[in-house]
Image (tube, helix red, strand yellow):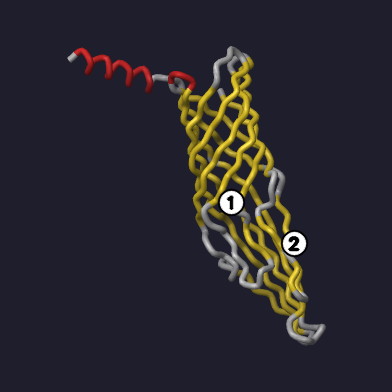
Amino acid sequence: MKPLCLLFLWAAAAFSQPFSFGVKGGMPMTDFVNTATSGRFTASTATSRYIVGPTAELRLPFGLGVEVDLLYRHFHYSSSGGIGSIASNLTNMDTTAGAWEFPLLAKYRFKGKHIRPFLDAGVAWDKLSGLTQTVQSVVASVSKSTTTSTPLELSKDVTRGYVMGGGVDVKVLLIHISPEVRFTRWGAKHFIDPNGLLNSKVNQAEFLVGITF
């Protein structure tokens, strides 16, 4: 009976540890897709230099913790070129989308009073959102425009990966400021272009700053 009571008290203490919540923001250190030039077609990309979203953490004993984030970023890519041997046959494709990243991380803080280095690792899911591709073509001076949410290069709407990172937790009064660098290795690509013009990256690096209470 005594060991059972001790186990109950330990579990109660663990789950009574405070939750922290706040916001996490930063910037990607890598582009979302790779682009290339192939024949008469060229592609380019632009990844918005911001990542932002809510964050929450359950602080456990012995410097341990469990963190969940919901981070949003936006990206854009385009391609253009001629079709066939006629110079007036042109096609321009412009694609915009967002991506929701959901990391679930185990965390360890080293000892310290106001400044505590930490390491984290876990899994993450990435979900595309608002994917829109506009295709404008000109054939023999006749212009045509179409829009789709399922471009040919779309391979997976959702992908999963593994995350590891590290940073420091700085406590200022009741606020925790936590800059960190994270690396993610995705298990599959969102985009695989059959023409080889673009492919989404499987390696991702981010610089993030969390502000929690």
Farthest left residue?
A: 1
Instruction: Please tell me whether mark 1 sits on a helix, a strand or a loop.
Output: strand
Determine the image quadrant of residue 113.
top right
Q: Residue at x 47, y 27 (%)?
A: 65
In the image, residue 192 sits, relative to residue 85, either above or below, namely above
In the image, residue 118 sits, relative to residue 187, either above or below, namely above
Q: Residue at x 39, y 19 (%)?
A: 16
Looking at the image, how many numbered discs can be counted on the residues? 2
Q: Which mark is residue 44?
A: 2
Q: Which mark is residue 99?
A: 1
Determine the image quadrant of residue 24.
top right
Residue 170: image location, x then y, percent: 63, 20
Instruction: Please tell me whether mark 2 sits on a helix, a strand or a loop.
Output: strand
Marks 1 and 2 sit apart, C-alpha to C-alpha, by 18 Å
Quadrant for the N terminus in the image: top left
Would you call the spot at circle 1 few (<14 residues within 10 Å), some (14-19), or many (20 or more)? Answer: many
Q: Residue 60 carries which label?
A: none
Q: Is residue 2 left or right of residue 113?
A: left
In the image, residue 96 sits, relative to residue 23, either above or below, namely below
Quadrant for the C terminus in the image: top right
Residue 190: image location, x then y, percent: 57, 59
Q: In this view, does 7 lie to the left or right of 209?
A: left
Q: Say which amino acid is labelled 1.
A: Ala
Q: Residue at x 81, y 83 (%)?
A: 88
Name the one closer to the observer, 55 or 122. Answer: 122
Residue 39: image location, x then y, percent: 76, 75
Q: Say which amino acid is labelled 2.
A: Ser
Q: Who comes first in sequence, dot 1 or dot 2? A: 2
Q: Nearer the viewer, mark 1 or mark 2?
A: 2
Q: Is residue 183 left or right of residue 121?
A: right
